[in-house]
Every structure is written in structure tokens, then in C-alpha cells.
């Protein structure tokens, strides 16, 4: 998937396991599912289950597997997409009238059940501000969307890659990173040493995170009156004692908050940059469309 709306950097990749069969020509495909179920997980999170027979071909490559979600605009029943199945879809989508083309947003594969041809998407609700949050709040069975999702494990849409020799892991995130954090924790080998710092809006957003890892999870409940979204997480991180051994950090959430944590880790904690994967999942005051425009302008200027 070529689009990188938000800042994302990864540590060197581990070796991917070999494909069991010949990989498809493109590791991504468009699917056109309907909503089959909607479940409120907590005050801030809603799970939308998508289904179409072709989703039996969806393959997740790892804990923080991302994909693109396309939503209809007001007055449309299906998202309008470019007529293409080739690798040029993004250029063609960008070339379409922004008032007509489907709204594109980035989400995490929260659950994939090939046998039932179902995909779970967990949305962090942040009110009416954004089309995706607004859509998820009102989602009903039968609603139609499109997704560009992986059909091969080696697809470039997975950033959680602890280098060989990692002794323990630091995982941090907000509600938008909870789906990834839950899958990462669920997939870790038993006994893996983990410290996780997760910031949410409500005490009831502290969802169970089943894992056989040796995980110490610290939940932070955001103070809505706090002037700075970063300060709480940063203070908690600074107060977290680090175990001995080689750490690997995976940080995701609001872009400025993630950058501040990375600065703390490379500065005060002396962690090498290569041991940190950091992803701005969203940026305060900017829509994902604006971030894509900025990325395109930067690419054009470079
Ligand atoms: C790799 C990746 C994986 C992601 N996975 C998930 C996921 O599984 N679940 C999930 O909920 N999100 C996820 N996100 C984040 C999601 O893409 C953004 O929150 C997105 O901006 C939401 O789109 P929107 O249309 O609701 O808001 P936009 O139209 O993009 O933004 C509108 C306004 O809302 C603000 N805003 C956006 N998100 C939030 C928020 N969470 N809280 C407060 N204000 C916000 C923006 O700053 C902007 O001012 C992921 C992002 C990335 C890059």
C-alpha cells in the first residue's frame, strides 16, 4: 500500500516466514463488503463486522496490519472508487473529484475470520468531527463500504517487527492503537516481557487484553480538561522503570505525542533509533485527507 498519510518509521525487519504457496501478483485487493454486525465495546470504541464472500481471501500479516477503508459520501450508498484493479489505484483515486470519490481512511485488522469471510474493524469514536468516526457511530447492518486489504502475509502493511535479540518490549498507544495493541499482545510468544502504556478517554475503555506474554499493562485515563494531550503519557513514560536488557519499542497514537515519546526514548533513555517503531495514527487538528495532501506536496517538492 503506497500511501503514508502519517509519520511512520520502523526498525529493521525480521525475516518473513516463507509463503506456503505462490504469492498473488499484488499483496492487496479491493473488497466490497456490507456491515453484518455492530457492537459497542466501550464508551469510545465500536466494533463493526464486515462481510462479503471474497473476504475469505483476506490475510493478515501481523499484529498491526493496516488496511484502507473507503466510505460513501453523504447522498451515496456505496463509495465511489476508480475503475482499476492495478497498482495505479491511488493516483487514480487522487485524480478524482474530492467531493465525489470515496472517503479513504486507514484502520487496523482487528480480527479476520476467513472461514466466515468476516473482517472486524474497531473504531475509536471521536465525535462528529471526522467522516469515519461519524460513519462508525451510525453504522447499521447492510451499510456498504469498500476496503483495500491484504491477500498475502508479506504485504508491507505491518510495522511491529522486533529485531532479533530483543529482551523486552515497550508498547504505547491510545484508543486508535488499541486494536493493534490487542492483536500484538495476543500474538506474542508466552513469557515475552512487555511493558504497555495505554491512554484512553474513559475508565470503561480499559478492555481485556488476553495474552500469554509476561505483560504489565498500565492504563491512563485522559483528563479531558488537560491542555496538552501529550503530557500525561510522557510523564507516565518517564516514571516507568525499564528492565535490564535490550528493549524494542512500538509507539502509536496522536503524531505529536508519539514524536515526544520517541524523543524521550532516544534522549533520556538512550535507546537506538533502530529499536523504535513509531506511527502517528492521526494528527490533532488535521484530517487524514490533509495529511495525504501534505505528503503529496512534500513528495512533489523533494
Ligand atoms: C496505520 C494506522 C492504523 C490505524 N488503525 C486505527 C484503528 O484500528 N482504529 C481507529 O479508530 N483508528 C485507527 N487509526 C486512526 C484513524 O485512521 C484516524 O483517527 C482517522 O483520522 C479517523 O478518521 P476520521 O474521518 O474520523 O477523522 P479525520 O477526518 O481524519 O479528522 C477529523 C478531525 O478529527 C481529529 N481526529 C482524528 N482521529 C481522532 C481521534 N482518534 N481522537 C480525536 N480526534 C481525532 C483530527 O485531528 C481532525 O481534526 C489508524 C491510523 C493508522 C495510520
Image (cartoon, grey):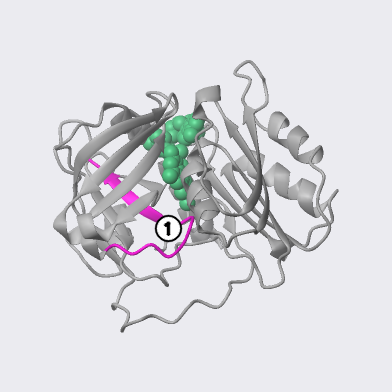
Compared with residue 18, is residue 295 higher up or lower down, i.e. above or below?
above
Residue 133 at what x, y percent from top left? 37, 32
Identify which residue, 18 or 13, lies in the foreground: 18
Compared with residue 258, is residue 136 higher up or lower down, i.e. above or below?
above
As drawn, is 186 to the left or to the right of 224?
left
Which of the 4 image quadrants contains residue 35? top left
Residue at 61% in and 25% down: 221
Residue 205 at what x, y percent from top left? 50, 29
As drawn, is 279 to the left or to the right of 248?
left
Query: Where are the magenta residues, as a range?
Result: 58-72
Residue at 25% in and 31% down: 139
Residue at 56% in and 63% down: 302
Compared with residue 162, is residue 174 higher up or lower down, i.e. above or below?
above
Identify which residue, 123 or 279, lies in the foreground: 123
Any atom of ligand 1 within 8 Å of the CB at mark 1?
no
Q: Main secondary structure of the magenta part?
A: loop
Identify which residue, 12 or 163, lies in the foreground: 163
Dot 1, how many residues are within 10 Å of its Cα: few (below 14), some (14-19), or many (20+)?
Answer: few
Q: Within the magenta stretch, is there residue 63?
A: yes
- Determine the secondary structure under disc 1: loop
Q: Is residue 202 visible?
A: no
Compared with residue 85, is residue 67 higher up or lower down, i.e. above or below?
above
Residue at 37% in and 55% down: 67
Residue 167 at what x, y percent from top left? 73, 63
Q: Is residue 156 visible?
A: yes
Tag 1 residue: 3
Residue lying farthest to the top in this orientation? 225
Q: Within the magenta stretch, is there residue 185?
A: no
Amino acid at each position: 500500500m503506497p500511501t503514508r498519510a502519517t509519520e511512520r518509521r520502523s526498525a529493521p525487519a525480521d525475516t518473513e516466514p516463507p509463503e506456503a504457496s505462490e504469492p498473488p501478483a499484488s499483496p492487496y485487493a479491493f473488497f466490497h463488503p456490507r456491515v453484518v454486525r455492530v457492537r459497542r465495546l466501550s464508551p469510545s470504541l465500536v466494533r463493526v463486522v464486515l462481510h462479503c464472500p471474497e473476504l475469505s481471501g483476506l490475510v493478515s500479516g501481523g499484529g498491526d496490519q493496516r488496511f484502507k477503508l473507503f466510505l460513501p459520501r453523504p447522498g451515496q450508498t456505496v463509495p465511489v472508487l476508480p475503475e482499476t484493479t492495478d497498482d495505479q489505484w491511488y493516483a487514480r483515486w487522487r485524480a478524482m473529484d474530492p467531493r465525489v470519490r470515496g472517503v479513504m481512511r486507514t484502520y487496523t485488522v482487528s480480527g479476520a475470520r476467513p472461514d466466515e469471510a468476516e473482517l472486524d474493524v474497531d473504531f475509536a469514536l471521536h465525535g462528529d468531527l471526522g467522516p469515519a468516526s461519524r460513519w462508525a457511530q451510525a453504522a447499521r447492518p447492510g451499510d456498504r463500504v469498500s476496503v483495500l486489504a491484504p491477500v498475502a502475509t508479506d504485504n508491507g502493511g505491518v510495522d511491529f517487527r522486533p529485531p532479533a535479540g530483543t529482551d523486552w518490549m515497550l508498547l504505547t498507544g491510545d484508543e486508535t492503537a488499541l486494536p493493534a495493541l490487542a492483536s500484538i499482545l495476543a500474538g506474542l510468544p508466552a513469557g515475552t516481557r512487555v511493558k504497555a502504556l495505554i491512554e484512553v478517554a474513559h475508565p470503561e475503555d480499559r478492555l481485556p487484553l488476553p495474552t500469554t506474554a509476561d505483560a504489565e499493562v498500565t492504563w491512563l485515563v485522559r483528563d479531558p480538561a488537560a491542555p496538552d494531550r501529550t503530557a500525561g503519557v510522557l510523564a507516565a513514560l518517564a516514571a516507568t522503570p525499564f528492565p535490564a536488557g535490550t528493549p524494542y519499542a512500538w509507539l502509536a497514537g496522536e503524531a505529536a505525542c508519539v514524536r515526544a515519546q520517541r524523543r524521550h526514548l532516544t534522549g533520556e533513555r538512550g535507546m537506538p533509533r533502530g529499536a523504535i517503531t513509531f506511527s502517528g495514527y492521526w494528527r490533532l487538528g488535521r484530517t487524514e485527507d490533509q495529511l495525504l495532501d501534505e505528503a503529496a506536496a512534500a513528495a512533489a517538492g523533494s
